[in-house]
Image (cartoon, coloured by chain):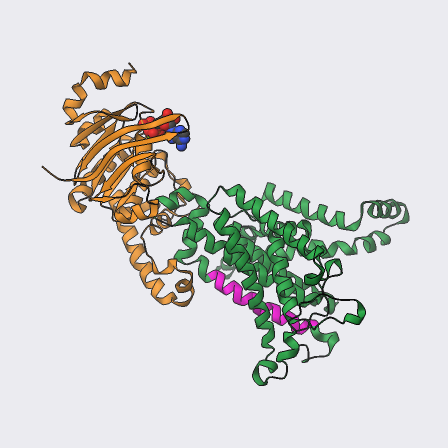
Chain colours: A orange, B green
Amino acid sequence: MASAILRVRGLVMDFGGVRAVDNCSLNVDEGSITGLIGPNGAGKTTLFNLVAGFHKPTTGRVTFRDERIDGLPSYLIFRKGIVRTFQIPRELKRMSVLENLMLVPSDQLGESMWRAVAARWLVKRQERAIEAQAREVLEFTGLSEVADLPAEGLSGGQKKLLELARTLMAKPRMVLLDEPGAGVNPTLLRRLVGGIRRAREELGITFLIIEHDMGLVMRLCDHVIVMSEGSVLTQGAPAAVQQDDRVVRAYLGD
Amino acid sequence: MLEFLTAFAILVGIYSVFALGLNVHWGYTGLFNIGVAGFFALGAYAAALLTIRPPLSNQGEDYLYSGDLANRLDSLPVVGVLDLWFVAALVAASLVAAAVALVVGTITIRLRGDYLAIATLGIAESVRLVFLNERWLSNVSRGIYTIPRPFGDIVAPQDYDRVYLVVVLVVFVVLFAGIRALVHSPWGRVLRAIREDEVTAEASGKHVFRFKLQAFVLGAVIMGIGGALYAFNFRAISPITFTPLLGTFIIWAMLVAGGSGRLYGPIVGAFVVWGIWSGSQFLPNVVERLPEAVGAPVLDALESVGLPNIRFFAVGVLVVLVLLYAPDGITPGIVRLRERLAGRMRRRARA
Ligand SMILES: Nc1ncnc2c1ncn2[C@@H]1O[C@H](COP(=O)(O)OP(=O)(O)O)[C@@H](O)[C@H]1O
Ligand SMILES: [Mg+2]
């Protein structure tokens, strides 16, 4: 039995009168590809926002590698190794695809104003290393040909791949993907699935993936968690979950 | 003519500095500062108050603060010869602008974007009203005058503008080189990312607040230095200079016309807008040369509308035209033109 890299306990998130996440508890095993499914409005995206520090939970706890992270600002959670994507891609439109990625590494020398001016030689050297890493990630995700294009020029599917590329650029321990397959054509989808699998095998990254396409979930995931009305309805192996009556009923809005 | 061109170039240089500061705010970071005049005024008054001689009480000028720095340092060996009081004045202008930006930024940058806009506008107006009402500090609407000239004893007074043009150019080039290095660095990349999408910058692990605050303070410092340069150019400042139209609108017009978020945008914009602004003063002379039948009614119209309003109108029209036909400003068009010309030359050389 693998140990849990992420533990969520009794998490609650209220937006005014709406309780988007309601006493939610779950574990994600280290090195797994875990699917997170559930009808629209179940609170999946909100759960991502809570785990990644984009919202502060009303109550509850989030533990990552045995360390509490709930309430930390997002950039600190990022540094602990959790990186998320967006359901609707949020590329940096007027920056090149390459720049979108070169932005990501933490603690770049040239991010200090002082060193950006006074230690340009050192900064340039580090820039070369970061660029090499970014080109490697572009190769990995099959985006090399569009490296120098402004990101706004990418197709919908390529933008989804760029979201994945951004997370890989961070050298994360855990990646939260919000509907990576939605609106992606079959060719790019194969590339996406291959990329996720290889990232897990070669880099040991844990994935938590929100996905509506059950075919994709069956192909990709070791374990599936079903959310409904803000909390976990059931979980288990993909095939077992698919057979579960409660899941079907939740989707039908019963 | 040469005098006119020199004075023109000085002001293009000074306004380029303001627009450079606004480019750091809006062009690169997306910080909506609509109170440029506030930092402009703070820099101008800080530099002026630090360097002026004490006022003569027998002339009824009873404001209290005068650093008299130019006079006091004059007899020192190296410091006096190099007019280092001028550098001290620029530093003082920077520090005052930085301090105010730090306070305003810390309070408002965490909030939604509109709060920064409201706060900057509010600060600009408060600063102006303080200088307009506090006799002890700023001599109210009469303003502060006899501000000393840096390197004033090198040439005869009537030739001084040439010296000051060099001073302005040196300051501008130093600031420009610094900004160029910064915007091309990873630091500048984070700013541009924030401008494009703050949430994505956040999801890329950046401490967005810290970078925005740094950019806000840097831009304010540049505006403060611009204010100091302005004060030493006119040798007299009063609150009338720092109204929203004269201290903020015109600088926004320059940045938008030149090209926001472009390295050369501020210079191109300052040149074009200041060209229209100062060129419009010759409008009556031109109209007078027209045949009487056409000229007289136009002249009447000019008189009744007033030259200042016509200037603002002309600049406003320019901004609208740019936004309609070249939303990225004039600079990209110039770049394209240059590339096309270079291409034609290459082809001709080959033929
Ligand atoms: N920022 C927000 N402000 C207010 N309500 C929100 C916000 N984000 C999500 N919600 C609400 O929370 C509920 C869960 O939404 P979400 O997490 O996006 O669901 P899912 O991703 O599972 O479709 C919905 O009712 C949604 O309207
Ligand atoms: Mg969602």
Q: Quadrant of the C terminus of chain A?
A: top left
Q: Residue at x 49, y 48 (%)?
A: B107
Q: Quadrant of residue A107?
A: bottom left
Q: Residue at x 50, y 58 (%)?
A: B218
Q: Is residue A199 above or below residue B169?
A: above
Q: Nearer the viewer, residue B37 or A19?
A: A19
Residue B147 image offset from top left, x and y in percent: 69, 70
Q: Quadrant of residue B221?
A: bottom right
Q: Quadrant of the N terminus of chain A?
A: top left
Magenta segment: B161-180
Seen as rendered, the residue at the extreme left is A1
Seen as rendered, the residue at the extreme right is B292
Predominant SS along the magenta part: helix
- A190 on left or right of B192: left
Seen as rendered, the residue at the extreme top is A254
Residue B173 image offset from top left, x and y in percent: 54, 66
Residue B102 image offset from top left, x and y in percent: 50, 55
Q: Residue at x 48, y 55 (%)?
A: B215
